[in-house]
Image (cartoon, grey):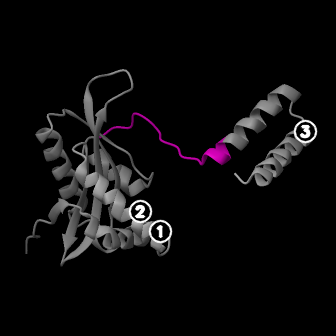
């Protein structure tokens, strides 16, 4: 029996709880608090109002089982050429390999064509399964995206700077890090 084509549509603020459930299920982050829910509703409203953004969802039996975020922007910092950047492709584990990711990517291509954009990029969570899926669709690796908090990065940069200035004097680096932490606590930031 052939599969029915997944229902793909643009997300709305009323989808916030269902999307948060999907994210919790796929990322194992736990249940969101009330502030996270309010933020999600606001972010979905902002996305719906922005002509350069879209959050697509795929449904099965009235339940959101997959999502994909799209944004239109420059292909690089020095180019006027535009690209549709796809990210946060999530599919509920129980619905993987049933065409939901494919349907979302088809809708992304249609949106890019509608916007007159000829290039697409995909940012992934680094999972082997997601990367293989995108490779089968013809997307090649051109960059690696890494993420860190500003506090963690500041600490590492300070450690590296101190290490190079002191010839790797570990004790001095630790003392400086402790002083910065104490100073931040004292100022309340």
Query: Dividing the picture into quarters, in which one does residue 90 lie?
Result: bottom left
Above or below: residue 161 compared with residue 94: above
**Residue position marked by numbered label 1 in the rendering:** 35
Give the position of the N terminus as an image quadrant. Answer: bottom left
**Residue position marked by numbered label 3 in the rendering:** 172
Q: Would residue 149 be found to the left or right of residue 75 on screen?
A: right
Q: Quote the CA–CA distance across marks 1 and 3.
A: 40 Å
Where residue 117 appears, as percent x and y from the top left, is: 18, 34
Q: Badge 3: few (under 14), some or many (20 or more) residues near its Cα, within 10 Å?
A: some
Q: Secondary structure at mark 3?
A: helix
Q: Is residue 79 magenta?
A: no
**Residue position marked by numbered label 2 in the rendering:** 39
Residue 178 or residue 76, whichever sits in front: 178
The secondary structure that most of the magenta stretch takes on is loop
Where residue 38 appears, as percent x and y from the top left, is: 40, 67
Which badge, 1 or 3, is on the more N-terminal residue?
1
Closer to the observer: label 1 or label 3? 1
Q: Secondary structure at mark 1?
A: helix
Above or below: residue 36 compared with residue 117: below
Q: Is residue 140 magenta?
A: yes
Read off the magenta span.
Answer: 139-153
Tag 2 near tag 1, CB within 8 Å: yes
Residue 95 or residue 113, whichever sits in front: 113
């Amino acid at each position: 029996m052939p599969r029915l084509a997944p229902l793909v549509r643009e997300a709305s603020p009323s989808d916030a709880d269902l999307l948060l459930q999907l994210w919790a299920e796929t990322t194992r982050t736990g249940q969101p608090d009330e502030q996270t829910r309010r933020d999600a509703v606001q972010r979905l409203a902002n996305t719906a109002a922005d002509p350069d953004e879209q959050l697509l969802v795929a449904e099965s039996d009235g339940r959101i089982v997959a999502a994909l975020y799209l944004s239109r922007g420059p292909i690089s910092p020095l180019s006027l050429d535009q690209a549709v950047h796809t990210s946060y492709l999530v599919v509920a584990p129980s619905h993987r390999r049933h065409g939901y990711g494919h349907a979302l990517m088809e809708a992304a291509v249609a949106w890019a064509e509608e916007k007159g954009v000829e290039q697409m990029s995909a940012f992934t969570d680094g999972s082997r399964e997601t990367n293989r899926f995108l490779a089968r669709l013809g997307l090649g690796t051109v960059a690696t995206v890494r993420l860190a908090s500003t506090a963690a990065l500041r600490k590492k940069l300070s450690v590296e700077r101190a290490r190079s200035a002191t010839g790797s004097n570990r004790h001095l680096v630790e003392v400086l890090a402790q002083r910065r932490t104490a100073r931040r606590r004292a100022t309340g930031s």
